[in-house]
Amino acid sequence: MKSSKRSLSMILLTLTLSIGGLTGCTSTDPNNTVNSETNSNDNQKQSNHQDQLDITVSIIPQKYFVKRIGGDLIKVNVMVPQGAVPDTYEPKPQQIQALSEAEAYIGIGVPFETVWMDRISQANPKLLTVDSSEGIEKLTMTDHDHDHGHDHGHSHDGEKSNLDPHVWLSPRLVKIQAENIYETLVKLDPKHQETYQTNLNNFLQEIEELDDKIRSNLSNIKQRKFIVFHPAWGYFAEEYNLTQVAVEVGGQEPSAAELGNLIKEAKEENIKVIFAQPEFSSQSAKTIAKEIEGEVLLISAINEDWSNNLLEVSQTFAKVLKEDNN
Ligand SMILES: [Zn+2]
């Protein structure tokens, strides 16, 4: 159903192009009438804008990944807007509605997808839905240390929500996501396979170089433990031999006793910087910083300029963790 509909519109499109020749913009796609966001590119791309695949992703860094592989062939919408937190986000009804225009939803396994994917599919039964984190072995969230009171050996939902969703912050894991995104684009648009393949290879090369730079930035630091409000850096820490200590406990502000323990740990380890991210209130991070006569430093975990952001984070870590050791 999905592919036959698609091939039908391909045939129609081909017909229009061959009949219409250079006049180009005649739309045979009934979905195109409500499509406002493609208009920004219309001036440069008059002849092929109706060819653009409309893809929705969950979070901002995924836009970077999809654009790296799809380039101008893809229009990307992001579900979780700037400033919102993917861990707890609830899509707006208009966003679900807007998905009736989309050809694919590329998720990344953040918690809201589990809750919303049924509704997303209902809004557009021909939508291709993909989890780009497929094939990644996920870690358990380090902050979930409270007792759930049920058998973990055989649970489903509870177990799943316990897994660390922050897979976009490890270059190695982004390689796996890139392959999955590539597969999806080729499935939707096989005639551009070569372009996607070339772009994928370039992106994998970029990730490789990024990984080398991060590794070299972090190679000489002695203090490898860091404290961060929201534990988004578990995969990053694992990859680069760092230890993440979270302020948050189970997604909540810590209790006074837990805060006391963190302050004690920070003092013992001579930690002077508590990391936080702009999307979260960092009151308890400030409290700790005050107690240890240190500071709170904001680092971005949800950034559209994914590559440069991770490089900057590694530079910040290198600087701060080196200083701590003096
Ligand atoms: Zn998070």
Image: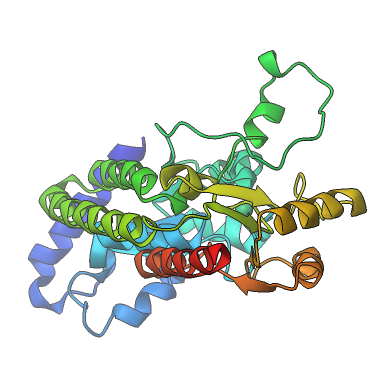
Evaluate whether residue 53 shows in this view.
no
Evaluate whether residue 318 shows in this view.
yes
Q: Quadrant of the C terminus?
A: bottom right
Q: How is the image coloured?
A: rainbow
The quadrant where residue 152 appears:
top right
Question: Looking at the picture, how far across and down is residue 128, in whole percent?
Answer: 41, 42
Question: Looking at the picture, how far across and down is residue 45, in whole percent?
Answer: 21, 77
The quadrant where residue 280 appears:
bottom right
Residue at the right extreme of this rendering: 256
- Residue shown at the point (24%, 52%) measured from the top left: 208
Question: Looking at the picture, how far across and down is residue 74, in whole percent?
Answer: 30, 62
Left or right of 114? Residue 50 is: left
- Residue shown at the point (17%, 63%) measured from the top left: 16
Q: Nearer the viewer, residue 239 or 198?
A: 239
- Residue shown at the point (76%, 35%) measured from the top left: 145
Q: Nearer the viewer, residue 50 or 18?
A: 50
Question: Looking at the picture, how far across and down is residue 8, in whole percent?
Answer: 25, 46
Q: Is residue 312 above or below residue 270?
A: below
Q: Nearer the viewer, residue 67 or 26?
A: 67
Q: Quadrant of the N terminus?
A: top left
Residue at the bottom extreme of this rendering: 43
Q: How many marks?
A: 0
Q: Is residue 43 above or below residue 60?
A: below
Q: Is residue 84 above or below residue 153?
A: below
Q: Nearer the viewer, residue 266 or 171?
A: 266
The quadrant where residue 286 appears:
bottom right
Left or right of 164? Residue 215 is: left
- Residue shown at the point (46%, 31%) measured from the top left: 137
